[in-house]
Amino acid sequence: MSRIGKKPVVIPAGVTAKVEGQAISVKGGKGELHFTAPDYVSVALEGTQIAVSPRSEDKKARAAWGMTRSIVNNLVIGVSQGFERKLEITGVGYKAAVQGKNLQLSLGYSHDISFPIPDGIAIAAPKPTEVSITGIDKQRVGQIAAEIRALRPPEPYKGKGVKYAGEFIFRKEGKKK
């Protein structure tokens, strides 16, 4: 039994949801998102709640049950509140700035990196050492944050690089004489 899957997704005021077979569409103040649920689960709209239940008791259905409920919940949160991921840049001369539809990053390489900002995602650099990624799709926001972090992941000796806000970097001791 999935403890997460058992809970229905509550639809807040200002958000409308439609369920047509396995297709779910959620519309809110920030935009509209769509998701097609796997065939292992059934999705039903019950008043102001969306209920997800497995079609059978096999392992795949139980695995898809909680995942589908979480994805539907993220759709509802995304169109009502949105998602944000913050990155911190650490290192001498490392900085970020938004120029038009690109994020310009100086990460210690011989050249600056120009990261194109995709549609549906907003990237801001309130400080040269901070990057804020916002959007309505949690998966896309997290993926873009991971792609930016992968340009210069934090290294364990000095901690230089791009890291998630609040991420702990395990430090190593340097060489000993």
Image (cartoon, rainbow, N blue to C red):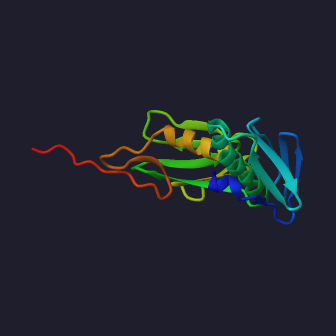
Q: Residue 88: percent from the left, percent from the top?
A: 49, 54
Q: Residue 117: percent from the left, percent from the top?
A: 68, 41
| Quarter of image, res 154 | top left
Q: Nearer the viewer, residue 6 or 82?
A: 6
Can I make out residue 32 in this image?
no
The extreme bottom residue here reads: 13
Which residue corresponds to the image point at 30% horizontal and 46% vertical from the top-left?
Answer: 157
The extreme front residue here reads: 57
Can I make out residue 123 in this image?
yes
Q: Is residue 33 left or right of residue 3?
A: right
Q: Residue 79: percent from the left, percent from the top?
A: 79, 55
Q: Nearer the viewer, residue 95 or 13?
A: 13
Q: Residue 35: percent from the left, percent from the top?
A: 78, 41
Q: Which quadrant, please, contains the C terminus?
A: top left
Which residue corresponds to the image point at 74% horizontal and 61% vertical from the top-left?
Answer: 81
Q: Nearer the viewer, residue 21 or 135?
A: 21
Up/down of 147 relative to 131, above or below: above
Up/down of 121 relative to 112, above or below: below
Which residue corresponds to the image point at 85% horizontal and 56% vertical from the top-left?
Answer: 28
Which residue corresponds to the image point at 63% horizontal and 56% vertical from the top-left?
Answer: 3
Q: Is residue 157 left or right of residue 74?
A: left
